[in-house]
Amino acid sequence: MLTTNPFSELYTLVPPPAMQSYVIVMLLLVVAGTVVDVMHKKSAKYFFQAGVKSREARTREVGGGEKASIALKTAAYDVLASGEFCNQRRRIAHLLTMYGFVLFLISTFVMVFTAADAVTSAIWPLLWYLGALMVAGGGYWFWFNIRVDVAAEGNPWYRVSRADLFVLSLLGSTTFAILWGAVQAGAGVGFWSMLFFALFIIASTVLFGSVPWSKFAHMFFKPAAAYQRHLGEADGSRQNLPPPADKPEQFGLGIKREAPRHY
């Protein structure tokens, strides 16, 4: 099971070109959805205006080498380590979900485009299941433990809003992928395996097709916003703004800002 490409098992029912076309369409939906999200929310305009204001308010010039250093630190701390989360449990859940999603996405792409080959390297199915399990572990931990915690969000697990579309469709995609692979490995291609495969495709279509309405596009905006924030701290353009939430300091009226209990 863990070393067999589940997409190769469907060769007789779903030809590899059809699977490959589906992956390409999902990729195009992400690109189109992100563009629509940028235009609707005017994110590019916001970043441009924020950049202009930052340049006007800066107190020192930041050279190219320092900008490159800030970009590397942003990638290492804010992106790869999710350093913006103050709550350690939420950070771990986010990292599990993020890295699991990356593994799941890359291995899916590789296995779909090698489904017609005689043998797919055993590492890719293993990474596929590992990524799916990481997403499921981090996602369900967040949904049933962290999200319902009063100290965090305090939302009942059964309360669903549009903002939850991304995490729910992602959980659905990985969960049905695991069930499909497990049933197909045990009983071969049959009713139940095809049912879970169909649910996997539906959840994946919702995941990649709902970019303008979900938080999917946030993963592209957050690194840019974090870089802009760090750059503003370096050139002095943020000196009149409140300090970061995880760095309590004294304000003019002698009021000390307390560190938040959650992000």
Image (cartoon, rainbow, N blue to C red):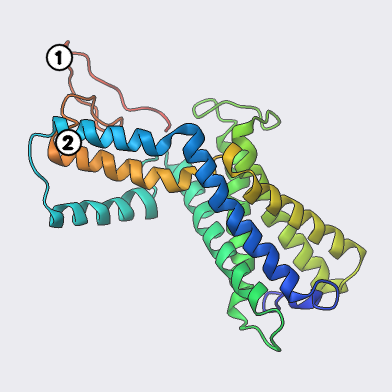
Nearer-the-camera pick, 73 or 65: 65
- Can residue 119 be spotted in the picture? yes
Q: Residue, x 75% and y 69% (percent of image)?
A: 18
Residue type at mark 2 is: Arg
| Res 252 label | 1
The crowding category of the residue bearing disc 2, from other C-alpha atoms within 10 Å (few below 14, some 14 to 19, many at least 20), is some
Residue 115 to residue 84: above or below: below
Give left or right: position of 214 versus 176: left
- Residue 257 sits in quarter: top left
Nearer-the-camera pick, 14 or 148: 14
The crowding category of the residue bearing disc 1, from other C-alpha atoms within 10 Å (few below 14, some 14 to 19, many at least 20), is few
Residue type at mark 1 is: Gly
User: Residue 141: image x %, image y %?
Assistant: 59, 44
Alpha carbons under labels 1 and 2: distance apart: 25 Å
Where does the C terminus fall, quadrant-wise? top left
The kind of secondary structure element at disc 2 is helix
For marks 1 and 2 on the same chain, the one whose residue lies earlier in the sequence: 2
Give left or right: position of 148 versus 76: right
Q: Residue, x 29% and y 32% (percent of image)?
A: 49
User: Residue 151: image x %, image y %?
Assistant: 49, 27
| Res 240 label | none
Q: Residue, x 51% and y 34% (percent of image)?
A: 40
**Comparing labels 1 and 2, the label whose residue is closer to the camera:** 2
- Residue 48 sits in quarter: top left
| Res 55 label | 2
Q: How many marks?
A: 2
